Image (cartoon, rainbow, N blue to C red):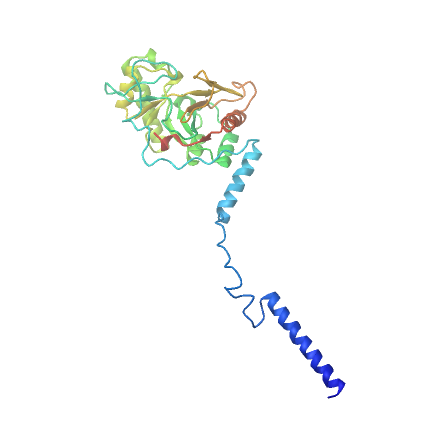
Amino acid sequence: MGWHAVDRRIVGAALAGLLLVTGLATGCGTGRAADSPASSPRPSAPEARPSRTEAGARTGTEAAYRKWGIEPLASPPAPPADKPASPGTAGGTGGTSGTGGTGGTGDGGVPVISEIPTEEKIVFLTFDDGAEKDPEFVTMMSELKIPFTTFLTDSAISSDYGYFEKLQDLGAGVQNHTLTHPNLRTLGAAAQKQEICGQQEKLKDRYGTAPRLLRPPYGNWNEDTRTAAASCGIEAIVLWRESMQIKNMQYQRGDKKLHPGDIILAHFRGPSELKGTTMTEMTANMLRRIQEQGFTVARLEDYL
């Protein structure tokens, strides 16, 4: 055999070996070593990931919090199947009360509540009156998607009913805060009924549904208030546990802390009442206080 034939055999064998090694390494050869179940473990199932829509919504909300200078609040839990503060369960000891008191359900009146029974670290935001109509507040709540409830007085909102329609479109509950914001305890039964029922009709005509909840101005009520509210279709009188000032909250409890289910009072107020602070700045301060204590915000009407 000549040297040329030997060379051709050697080169051929070398090429064959090279192709075999390459095929094994890349998994694309004719052998089954690279893609055989016996030689390669089955890949684990991919981890569940949020959809692009969910991820985009979360990113957008986080960006909105950054815009307003607030650390993001956690998402609230799903609303309970059965409302824990239904009219049949809410209430306390009854009697006459001022700000923040709790009343019972006897004598044909409605319950009076200041908090929702829950163990979840949630609180509820409420805004009263309607005097300030800050367009930036609409933008803020639209971007942050914070649930809240409004208790409206006709004498305060009548100059711009449309402003509160924008808030209603965001999901804000529209509830009763009387026609003219009187101290109800100074009025007789008939006058209280006019203040409450009159506002029921105003809000129903303007916003489509009659309110279920009443907040008496200044938190002042008596048994005539409860009786009048019941006759007007109100299901509960709603007070509060904390009230938002300009930078900090005012607490009713001595420990000066939020508790699960607390209802927080704020107002539609402008810089003239807030010492130069805007309503959006006050709201941002309130959300910071809530986030700092490890709470988030839920929708009051989902629990009451």
Residue 155 quadrant: top left
Rendered view: 302 above or below 44: above
Q: Position of residue 255 (x, y in %)?
A: 46, 17
Left or right for 282, reference 97 = right
Q: Position of residue 296 (x, y in %)?
A: 46, 31
Picture quarter with the C terminus: top left
What residue is shown at x 36% (from left), y 19% (from top)?
216
Left or right for 64, reference 208 = right
Q: Nearer the viewer, residue 34 or 224?
A: 34
Q: Position of residue 240 (x, y in %)?
A: 40, 21
The image shows a total of numbered marks equal to 0
What residue is shown at x 51% (from left), y 25% (from top)?
289
Q: Nearer the viewer, residue 239 or 71?
A: 71
Q: Residue furthest left?
A: 107
Q: Residue furthest front?
A: 1
Residue 239 quadrant: top left
Residue 104 quadrant: top left
Is residue 169 at least partly visible in the picture?
yes
Picture quarter with the N terminus: bottom right
What residue is shown at x 52% (from left), y 20% (from top)?
248
Q: Residue furthest bottom?
A: 1
Left or right for 16, reference 91 = right
Is residue 181 at least partly visible in the picture?
no
Q: Residue furthest right?
A: 3
What residue is shown at x 60% (from left), y 68% (from top)?
24
Q: Position of residue 293 (x, y in %)?
A: 50, 26
